[in-house]
Image (tube, rainbow, N blue to C red):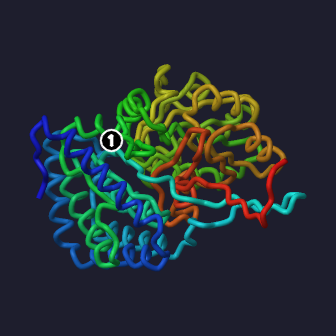
Amino acid sequence: MLQKPELDNVDEMMHEMGAEARKAFGVLSQSSTDNKNRAILAAARLIGEREDAILEANAKDMAAARDKGLTGAMLDRLELTPERLAGIRDSLEQIAALKDPVGDVIAGWDRPNGLKIERVRTPLGVIGVVYESRPNVTVDAGALCLKSGNAVILRGGSESINSSVALHRCLADGLEEAGLPAAAVSYVNTTDRAAVGAMLSGLGGNLDVIIPRGGKSLVARVQDEARIPVIGHLDGLVHVYVDKAADLEKAAKIIVNAKMRRTGVCGAAEKLLIDKAIAEKAVPALTTSLTEAGCALRGDDASRSLDDRVTPAETEDWVTEYLAPVITVGVVDGVEGAIKHIAAHSSGHTESIITEDQATADRFIQGVDSAIVMHNASTQFADGGEFGMGAEIGIATGRIHARGPVGVEQLTTFKYVVRGTGQTRS
């Protein structure tokens, strides 16, 4: 049942949740890998057993979202199906199978005085995750934090609250089955925005880091107001560059998949850049493939002169994450022109080059400063599960602490362990 606290009680409720999460972290951080895995696998089993109830809860969210006029991309992110629930269970099993990062020795060396020094992975602590729409994030974030020894406080969007509460219950019950505190994965089951403000304050020192996952307004609020460290996830202004040495048949296949497989994910291609050396042939060929797949085209003067189906692109089109079957097309001067364009317009998420020239690919990989850079691959692979991480909390676009898919290793920090035999310093 959803909590409906009075406004005056939200801050008190959140601080109590933070204190309980801190206690749970003390237990979880010392827990064995087997216990953590038992909790994760129990949650996977419970999601299967409770599938009908979870889908019923999701149907309520979907109906309310349609009444509110949410976009197709938001509805796609919100919807749960038997197939998607099966995918969530699979991701839980993959997370359980991952190597436990806690206690992993990252590096070790000996000093001339006989001291042995090791850099050892440790959990971050208590993590806050604030996100929109996607109920699967409830499970992915909860399980990733659990596996990496962190307690987590989850705050999903109001549009997905019934779905998220149902999924969270499986995680909480799984923890209790494994003899671990349910507060290790807490869910803020109120839609009051004051709860987010309380999390941004740090909950009296009980929250160590916060991770936003959502639209620009959510991320901007978190980055502007947070008094604790933030692992930032900006929007996906994803570019695909088709070089003069590209195989156009391969390029068309990659681009249609990168744009149209799922338009509402952050790894979906939003901008198509084409080398001017092949533009006369490549623009009509690639835009035809996209048009036949149902994608609308906007573009610069050069692309429009080669295909009258391309409508004029406005300035904002080059910095818009459509999350819809729309793509902006531009003609650039070779790989250097592509690198320059991406540097000016990208959010630092994911970029891909399509070329059969390895030297050009290497130059693109070296010159593009985004979290993920690809060669001859669809940008829809920008996903922690596809990277073998089991799942992800999101794609971090910053440079400090974590970058790219945030999985179990990215949810750890480290400490130094120094072993001696009685050494003293003169």
Residue 52 locus on image (x, y percent): 18, 72
Quadrant of residue 244 within the rendered picture: top right
Q: Amino acid at mark 1?
A: Leu
Determine the residue located farthest toward the right in the rendered image. Answer: 112
Going 74% across and 41% down the picture, which residue do you hit? 364
Quadrant of residue 207 within the rendered picture: top left
Asked whether residue 383 appears in the rendered view, the answer is: no
Image side of residue 349 versus residue 217, left or right: right
> Dot 1 lies on which element?
loop
Judge whether 118 appears above or below 314 on screen.
below
Going 49% across and 75% down the picture, which residue do you hit? 33
Going 42% across and 48% down the picture, which residue do you hit? 263
Q: Which residue is mark 1?
A: 203
Image side of residue 275 versus residue 67, left or right: right
Of residue 331 and residue 125, the one placed in the foreground of this image is 125
Image side of residue 37 versus residue 273, left or right: left
Residue 360 locus on image (x, y percent): 80, 43
Going 66% across and 50% down the picture, which residue do you hit? 374
Of residue 408 and residue 412, the one placed in the foreground of this image is 412
